[in-house]
Amino acid sequence: MSDEENDIILSELDDDELVQQMHDDLYDGLKEEIEEAVNILLERGWQPYDILTKALVGGMTIVGIDFRDGILFVPEVLMAANAMKGGMAILKPLLAETGAPRIGKMVIGTVKGDIHDIGKNLVSMMMEGAGFEVVDLGINNAVEAYMEALEAEQADILGMSALLTTTMPYMKVVIDTLVAQGKRDDYIVLVGGAPLNEEFGKAIGADAYCRDAAVAVETAKEFMARKHNQLAAG
Amino acid sequence: MTALAQMLADRDWILADGATGTNLFNMGLASGEAPELWNTDAPDKIRALYKGAVDAGSDLFLTNTFGGNASRLKLHDAQTRVFELNRVAAELGREIADAAGRPVIVAGSVGPTGEIMEPVGALSHASAVQMFHEQAEGLKAGGADVLWLETISAPEEYRAAAEGFALAGMPWCGTMSFDTAGRTMMGVTSPAMVQMVESLPNPPLAYGANCGTGASDLLRTVLGFTATGDERPIIAKGNAGIPKYVDGHIHYDGTPELMADYAALARDCGAKIIGGCCGTMPEHLSHMRRALEERPRGPLPTLELIVEKLGGFSSVSDGTDDAGPTRDRSKSRRRRG
């Protein structure tokens, strides 16, 4: 790294250059630089929602694509998500004040009997990186815990994760309960975890199986778009 | 010379064991229950697990202690029982191995902490070393011949385990799980693992790969180890195919015949200690044993042959051939480190 490259003064960049730089800084996991840039854009009169979508979510989308494609791996993604979090901490109260549109809300947790949460944590972080609100129920969730949180949080998406072949079938218990209570169509149900596959997702009646956190984000966006279209059409 | 070092010197190949979890679940372990608690609560089932592998021809088996570190046992409120559960598991193993009538190695299984280490995660190096050391002492007290680190993703965690094992003064082996585009979850490629292993002050007796995404991918990883020219013995412990959901239960689709092909190919790829992982039952092991005994050694397999015999890979590249995807960052003005 040359001195010249270290010498970027964020406040001297024009808006387009700054957003581009934020994408690079997110990719490199530079939290302080992201916080500084968010504040600069706010001072320049940017709407919090535009900063979120154009600068932060835009940058995390690139991180997500490269994670999906096997260019970036978990450590880099965690660093990027941490930088994103720094920016979000500044924006969050402002987004609420300005009544910015909601991208979507997800309730997520590992299923009953399963205590392996690295994958679920990654999905949470990447979903937040994409601007979703995430309610993380943690590990070992019984069907009641999911049902209660979905209701209380008015969530759009239910995410379930399992690492063990023995705990995977519990996902079906949760989905069957949703069906029995007539609530299945109220939520987008996404499932994931190392031993799962698309076939399994279909067999238990989930909307989609997501191979990794990046795919979870893309799938969630796609289903939310469909949902909005349906509402508009309805 | 330790028992495993002796066996490595005497033998051309060593058959390790298969699945622990899959076997225990078939014996009635409930989902979410800690298998390690059975070491004291249902010792006969653990004896049966070990004996199943030995009777099928394994020269080495792992103890039922994969989740036996303080971090994992804490989730079952059993973090105060680390030493005891590991000691008992190794004692039961000793009992079965010593009654086998031939040399059988008791390898003390040590799995990951399940935490992400600093700087990206919260687990400090010192705490990780302490946890691995504590588990190592229990396995040592129970009479394990060697410690067996497995399913590791992060190089930091592999190093911390090595340090913990050194504190216990135990020989060890260590495998990582290459389940993400041919790399570990943390992005480690097969040659990067070799480099890391050889940089340790107390390197393992053998290193390699376990679990992951099926037998084909695992052998591609072994070829990656071999290509470095490193002479340390290599371990191959692949899953018996891919899990499928059938009538509310999970089945691995790898047949005993497929695992026999896998075992012979693993040896041709350069692995010396060969076993299975998830889904590998005693029936698979006896087929693997027969293949290793009866089939002649072949030339170094090509990737095409592996695909033909065992099925396709989960990703085009495994990060060792420059054929993987990249991002052009020549225009970016600030680079990480």
Image: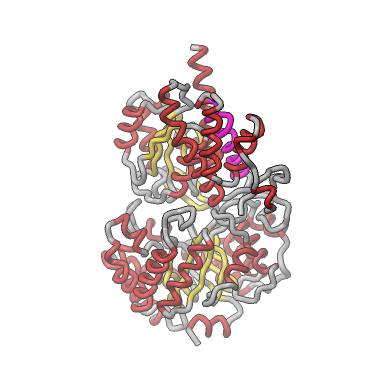
Question: Image height check: is A71 above or below A148?
Answer: below
Question: Where on the picture, by quarter, is residue B195?
Answer: bottom right
- Can residue A199 be seen in this snapshot? no
| Image location of residue B301, percent across then percent down | 71, 64
- Can residue A97 be seen in this snapshot? yes
Residue located at (30% from left, 62% from top): B79
In this picture the colour scheme is: secondary structure
Please identify the residue farthest to the bottom as the structure is shown.
Answer: B1
| Image location of residue A178, percent across then percent down | 36, 29
Is residue B260 highlighted in magenta?
no
Decide which of B309, B266 is in the foreground and name it. B266
Residue located at (50% from left, 50% from top): B243
Question: Image height check: is B169 above or below A154?
Answer: below
Question: Image height check: is B237 above or below B2?
Answer: above
| Image location of residue B224, percent across then percent down | 66, 64
Residue located at (39% from left, 73% from top): B136
Q: Would you say the magenta stretch is mainly helix, strand or loop?
A: helix
Question: Where on the picture, by quarter, is residue B310?
Answer: bottom right
Decide which of B333, A196 is in the foreground and name it. B333
Question: Where on the picture, by quarter, is residue A13?
Answer: top right
| Image location of residue A6, percent across then percent down | 64, 48
Is residue A66 highlighted in magenta?
yes
In magenta, the rendered stretch is A50-68
Number of dots carrying numbers:
0
Decide which of B162, A49 is in the foreground and name it. A49
Q: Is residue B162 left or right of residue A25?
A: left
Decide which of A148, B167 is in the foreground and name it. B167
